[in-house]
Amino acid sequence: GDAGGFGSRPHIVVLLADNVGWANVEWHRPPRVDPREVLTPNLMGLRAEGIELDRHYTYKFCSPSRSAFLSGRNPIHVNVYNDDPRRPQQGIPWN
């Protein structure tokens, strides 16, 4: 191995953000929107140095996407609200 644990393997960073719409990042800002309204210079830098995966379809609530990402389960198997995991049909099944 190499010192410090850094090798040639890629370092993967995934940003999963709630309530970020398509036009809420600078590179998707519609031309008619004031450029000062949407400023995301740090995200612009990360995008420039990496790749943007822009063909992702999601639910109107954040919980199915988050649950699918963290568990590997298909969002259809997770209730869309997940407001109280103790209630029947809420949250991710334990098995």
Image (spheres, helix red, strand yellow):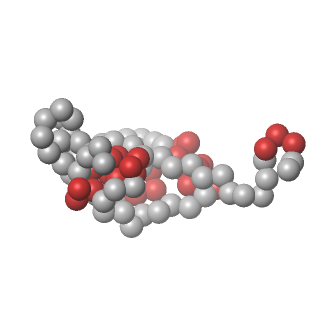
How many marks can you see? 0
The one of 57 and 94 positioned closer to us in this rendering: 94
Which percent across, then down, holds residue 40? 48, 43
Which percent across, then down, holds residue 44? 54, 50
Q: Residue furthest bottom?
A: 55
- The answer, for residue 88, to whether it is visible in the render is yes
Q: Going 60% across and 52% down the picture, which residue do you hit?
A: 12
Residue 85 occupies quadrant: top left
Q: Determine whether, in the image, residue 8 is placed left or right of residue 73.
A: right
- In this rendering, the answer to whether 36 lies above or below 7 is above
Residue 72 occupies quadrant: bottom left
The one of 11 and 2 positioned closer to us in this rendering: 2
Q: Determine whether, in the image, residue 40 is placed left or right of residue 23.
A: right
Q: Determine whether, in the image, residue 63 is placed left or right of residue 84.
A: right
- The answer, for residue 24, to whether it is visible in the render is no
Q: Going 47% across and 63% down the picture, which residue do you hit?
A: 53
Q: Determine whether, in the image, residue 89 is placed left or right of residue 18.
A: left
Q: Going 27% across and 56% down the picture, which residue do you hit?
A: 75
Q: Going 23% across and 51% down the picture, which residue do you hit?
A: 78
Which percent across, then down, holds residue 76? 22, 59
Q: Residue furthest front?
A: 95
Which percent across, then down, holds residue 8? 77, 58
